Amino acid sequence: MIRLYDTIEPNVIDEELLKLAVEEQGPQEAAGQVAKQEGINFKDVKSLQLDFQNILRIDNLWQFVSLRKLQLDNNIIEKIDGLESLVNLVWLDLSFNNIETIEGLDTLVNLEDLSLFSNRIAKMDAMDSLVKLQVFSIGNNMIDNLLNVIYLRRFTYLRSLNLAGNPICDDEEYKLFVTAYLPDLVYLDFRLIDAHTRELGDAKYQYSIYELKHRENQIQAKLEEEQATIAELEKHKAAYVEYLNGPFLFDSLYSEDVEAAKLAYLPGVPELLETYKTKFVEICQNIFDYGLVQQEKRKAEVAIFYECLEEALQENRKQGLKEVEDFDKIYTAYLNTIRNSNDIQFVDTKMSECAEEISRLFDRLMTLEMQLVEQLEETINNFERNIIDMVGVFVENVQGFPTMAQCRDLENHHHEKLLEISINTLEKIVKSEFDEDLPDDVRALFSDKDTVVNAVGASHDIHLLKIDNREDDLITNVTSWCTATVDKVHNDELDRNRKRVKEINQYVDHLQTDLDNMDFGDLLD
């Protein structure tokens, strides 16, 4: 089979091609000349037409982050890729290419209209992220199985579908199948679906669709359950107590403990382990519950702070606007007086007075800003003290009783009991008084006292390390959150203040410039 690019030189999407395309599709005449002189910023381009360019591969489009419409039809493209940055894309035309597989569309979550007409595609899939898809054209491809249509049921906004020219269209049940399985579809192959066709399709496939809906509902319920679990876990992580509401930490103590698995064969150890686990899990649950309560308190403290912050900013804006409004009346009166006067000395006097008013406005606006800075500084300092105290209390209580310290105490107590059982077992084995059957690797531990003590000690060390690490993670994470939160508040206020001071200076400079540039040609004549 001879491909198009065997006879035509393939083209690449490079900087030169992109500039040329943008210029040709941009404003013409004077506006176009200005755009060419000043340069075109690709990130501002909304529409791009690259059809009939012999393009083999999609590339170098990462700068077009604002692009909404992309035309790549009538090229020789073999693979859909290079579109990752085009997250604002709404309309995409890839018709009349050599594409064999649908792929590379994962980030195009805003896409509404997609054309893959006249390619070499045999299967419809890999479009799950296109949740806003309304129009889909995939005619003149190689789709030969009607079951492909079922995949499109996930697109709840899909209203227009073109499949004309695919092998499935030769199936006598084609239209009935599509209309039945896609009940919200309005147009099929550019024709309005009539009520009679829809009724026939519903009647023919009602039982199959009933079973399909049942399976879909089960899948959806499972998905919602998984999403709820993930959301709940995120809530726990935000409180820094994830996996403390159950046996997770306890199970992790033994997940890598080879010696403990061997010692569990000893008489009395299973019962000892069960008691240990019950008490350990209860303590973890207490930490978990306490962590969630403290997280809600921290959230409330943050919410109150930002509420107070917004109130202060709103009041300051209100006062600033009042100052500007009052000044505008005075400023306008001065300008009118100056324009209507023929006395140059009088004009000079009024201009000086107006300049003084501008200066006084600057002072008043800066005074308001300084007052706000002082007010917010006090508010931020109070918030910082409160949030640091809250985190400090949380950390202190987690480290003390009845929390992580009690977990360590339980582990120490369990270690003592386990060591006691192990030594007693060794003594019985030495005296040939031990009648229980033990696996060979377990019995090998009881060759001498040092081996037994080392095995029990190694298990104990692993457990303590896991407990210490979990405590360290909790403390490190909540402390890091505290630091990051406080730093952000300070940095945001610093940025706000700089922006406001710049804003005031620019406004006042603008007023003074307008005053200085007043036209007094008639007066001078």
Image (tube, grey):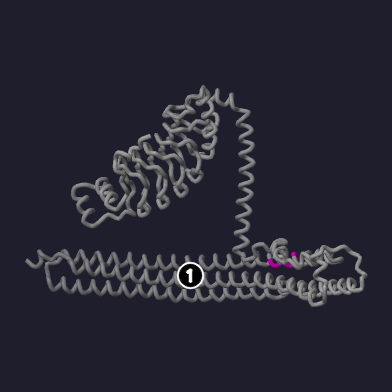
Is 525 left, or right, of 377 in this rendering? Answer: left
- Count residues near mark 1 (Cα–Cα under 10 Å), then give few for <14, some for 14-19, many for 20+: few
At 63% from the left and 57% from the top, the residue drawn is 232
At 72% from the left and 63% from the top, the residue drawn is 251
Q: Is residue 484 magenta?
A: no
Q: Nearer the viewer, residue 189 or 192?
A: 189
- Residue 285 can be seen, yes or no: no
Q: Which element is circle 1 on?
A: helix
Residue 335 lies in what quarter of the image? bottom left
At 51% from the left and 70% from the top, the residue drawn is 484
Residue 423 lies in what quarter of the image? bottom right
Is 29 left, or right, of 204 in this rendering? Answer: left
Whether 326 is drawn above or below 13: the answer is below
Image location of residue 91, percent across then percent down: 39, 42
- Residue 230 can be seen, yes or no: yes
Image location of residue 121, percent across then percent down: 45, 37
List the residue tagged with mark 1. 488
Q: Main structural element of the magenta stretch: helix, strand or loop?
A: helix
Is 281 left, or right, of 33 in this rendering? Answer: right
Image location of residue 250, percent across then percent down: 72, 65
Q: Which residues are magenta?
A: 281-287
Q: Nearer the viewer, residue 97 or 353?
A: 97
Please identify the quadrant where the N terminus is shown: top left
Image location of residue 109, percent across then percent down: 46, 47
Q: Amino acid at mark 1?
A: Lys
At 34% from the left and 73% from the top, the residue drawn is 364
